[in-house]
Image (tube, grey):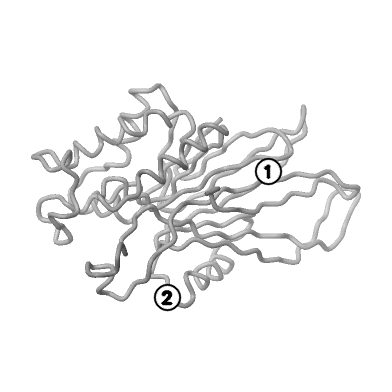
Amino acid sequence: MVEKLSKNVHKISLSGTYNEIAVLSDLHWDNPKCDRVLLKKHLDYCLDKKIPVVITGDLFCLMQGRGDKRSSKSDILPEHNNFKYLDSIVETAVDWFTPYAGILTVVGYGNHETAIIKWQETDILQRFVDLLNHTTGSSVYTGGYGGWIIYDVNLRTNVKVTFKHKYFHGSGGGGIVTKGAINLTRALETYEGFDMFTMGHIHENSCRNDSREILYVNSSITEIRLKQIHHCITGTYKEEYEDGSKGWHVERGAPPKPLGGRIIMISVKREKEGMLKSMDSKGFPL
């Protein structure tokens, strides 16, 4: 199902005229504020529907290690409160995600994972993926902080349609008014040739479509077409606001954040002018 083409480019093979892909980010799985009940519900949904899962950064929180100025005694789970903090996160995460190893495809880096590489000189995400693959026999890949996923949709023998997904974990703080909309517009300026752009990091959850004029040329047709580009911001599973009484999230004036990832819908339809393809997204069902 999944093939690594280069350092941060992967290909996922699909079939049929309609497919779904789950894109999650900002799970912060090892933080007590992670809503694991909701996360399990969404992963169980994907498992039941055989929906491949892509994670684009901050699978882990990793802020409670020795010397970490962000650490707080209230933000560490009992099973990680020991002398091998980082090791215990990897080991318990592998146990927890083992039932979903068969649907996990690409797991990218977020700022929480790269901070550990910088300050602790160990790659927790790669260690998690390696141990998960070793334990379960799965073929999960690490992605990048940013990267590409190519969805090859096989319709029949020698007939396929390709979708290009550009992902970037994210940067900046979003904004209580714009909620990341400016970041999506920046993506149009920075990247080219993608059908869909996704980002996380700012703990918002939304989507929008843009259109671009393109010149389509092949052996028999030269015409102007409109290309549809789908953008989405994937949400978080870390519920920090709680009752709004106190805490870092509340004290900095941040609002409650929407929880959950997004399901990408990939559709292909044959028309007289050729194959029409579209990408859209939706939230998980309640």
Instruction: List the residue tagged with mark 2.
Output: 176
- Side of 59 where 168 appears, left or right: right
Q: Is residue 204 above or below residue 123?
A: below
Tell me where residue 87 sits by quadrant.
Answer: top left
Task: Give the Cα distance between marks 1 and 2.
Answer: 36 Å
Query: Residue at image x 41%, y 40%?
Result: 40
Callouts 1 and 2 close, C-beta under 8 Å: no
Q: What amino acid does circle 1 point to?
A: Thr
Q: Secondary structure at mark 2?
A: loop
**Along the polypeptide, which appears first: circle 1 or circle 2?**
1
Question: Depth-wise, is mark 1 or mark 2 nearer the camera?
Answer: 2
Q: Secondary structure at mark 1?
A: strand
Numbered circle sitting on residue 162: 1
Q: Is residue 9 above or below residue 137?
A: below
- Side of 34 where 20 appears, left or right: right
- Side of 253 where 194 appears, left or right: right
x, y (%) of residue 264? 59, 48
- Side of 171 where 85 appears, left or right: left
Q: Residues within 10 Å of mark 1 (few under 14, many from 20)?
A: some
x, y (%) of residue 196? 60, 55
Tell me where residue 248 sits by quadrant.
Answer: bottom left
Query: Residue at image x 49%, y 69%?
Result: 183
Nearer-the-camera pick, 60 or 171: 60
Query: Residue at image x 29%, y 69%?
Result: 244
Q: What amino acid does circle 2 point to?
A: Ile
x, y (%) of residue 179? 47, 71
Numbered circle sitting on residue 285: none
x, y (%) of residue 220? 91, 49
Q: Residues within 10 Å of mark 2 (few under 14, many from 20)?
A: few
Nearer-the-camera pick, 262 or 255: 255
Query: Residue at image x 35%, y 51%?
Result: 58
